[in-house]
Image (cartoon, rainbow, N blue to C red):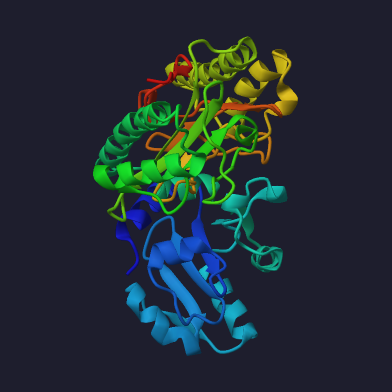
Amino acid sequence: MISEPVVAQAQEYMCQHQMSGWLVHSYRGSNPLFTELLGSTSMLTRPCFLYIPSAGVARIIGHHVDAGALEHSGLMPTTYRDRPSMVALLKDLLPAGANIAMEYSPMGAIPRASHVDAGTVELVRSLGLEVVSSADLLQYATQRWNDQQLASHRRAATALGRIVLEAFEYAGAHLNNPVNEYQVAQFIHEKFRGAGIDSPDGPIVAVNGHGSDPHYLPQRDGSSPIRTGDWLLIDLWAKETEAASVYADITWVAYMGAEVPPQQQEVFQIVTGARDAALTFLQQRASAGRPAEGWEADAVARRHIDEAGYGEYFTHRLGHSLGTEVHGEAVNLDGFETHDTRVIQPGIGFTIEPGIYLPEFGVRSEIDVFMYDSGPEATTPIQRDVVLVQAR
């Protein structure tokens, strides 16, 4: 059944931004948004089009052999038999000369917002229509958190903040008889179960040079023991078990000893300074009433690290959106891997997680942020100092 709240929010956004309509195209599961809007799309074997006008009733076009599979949508499908009839239906459905939003990103700049093949975009343009990106429309209509989701995120964030410190303590309690990275990861999963949260993958538990791999995952065989004098990075993410709950995601670092070595301390201060600079930038923009785009926040943090002389070691985007998946479909803080021009809209949650990855060790500091109408607010604990862990 099509989501009426999503349709209403989409129409609200389109009216505010002078868009004529939203055409959601999918072929054999090519567009995940199609499934999100309509539910199960099994047995859809031909191209389908869902059209949401800026005002009025949503319509759906599908091949006649797929008509039965579309009945659950709550919309009476208009069916075509062959390609000429499909093109004719589209021409009749879409208002002449209109600007139509699709899951298209100019030059492929935002891959998460790009699910329509070039040929289908050409087809729609051939009907005398302008195709515009649905990137900001999509996040406004489908990715903003409701109050229940924000509350679920905050509960998960509180749990993660507690569990990461417990994991450091667990490693510290065994320094005289070291546990390895994999054992700490299993300890974290056990704590997840006790807190009523879960994740299908992770966490990252990385000692010394393993922390230089931003996505290092310890395995049962080959994990490093955690000893006095080691640097330890832990990145953990989870959400409550209800399907609509949303993720929290944090990264903290610790030193197994009484005093942080000078180089690790220097890099930690640079990384956390970049994190704080990005958050301050977003707060200042909100206070000035000027929405920020994802790439702009990335640029602020990247400049901070560049000026400190470590730019080549910051090898990923600044942050990603959060949702019912840990990497959500909304704006990413990214001007490095992609060029994300989506606006950081109120109702969106995201991470800020700069990192510096040297061959000997890696440092990342990750917080979660929610964009309120009044501006951004960190929803997770913020690490200010390297955690010191000593043998008991």
Q: Position of residue 20 (x, y in %)?
A: 50, 55
311 up-or-down from 200: above or below: above
Location of the C terminus by quadrant is top left
Q: Which residue is located at x 36 percent, y 65 percent?
A: 57
Location of the N terminus by quadrant is bottom left
The quarter holding residue 387 reads top left
Residue nearest the viewer, comparing 177 with 199: 177
Q: Which residue is located at x 59 percent, y 42 percent?
A: 216
Q: Position of residue 25 (x, y in %)?
A: 55, 67
**Residue furthest toward the front?**
177
Residue nearest the viewer, comparing 90 with 168: 168
> Residue 372: in sight, yes or no?
no
232 up-or-down from 152: above or below: above
Residue nearest the viewer, comparing 26 with 181: 181
Query: On the picture, is 309 further left or further right than 138?
Result: right
Count of numbered circles on the image: 0
Q: Position of residue 236 (x, y in %)?
A: 44, 39
Q: Which residue is located at x 40 percent, y 46 percent?
A: 186
> Residue 358: in sight, yes or no?
yes
Query: On the picture, is 343 further left or further right than 368?
Result: right
Q: Position of residue 148 (x, y in %)?
A: 24, 43
201 up-or-down from 37: above or below: above
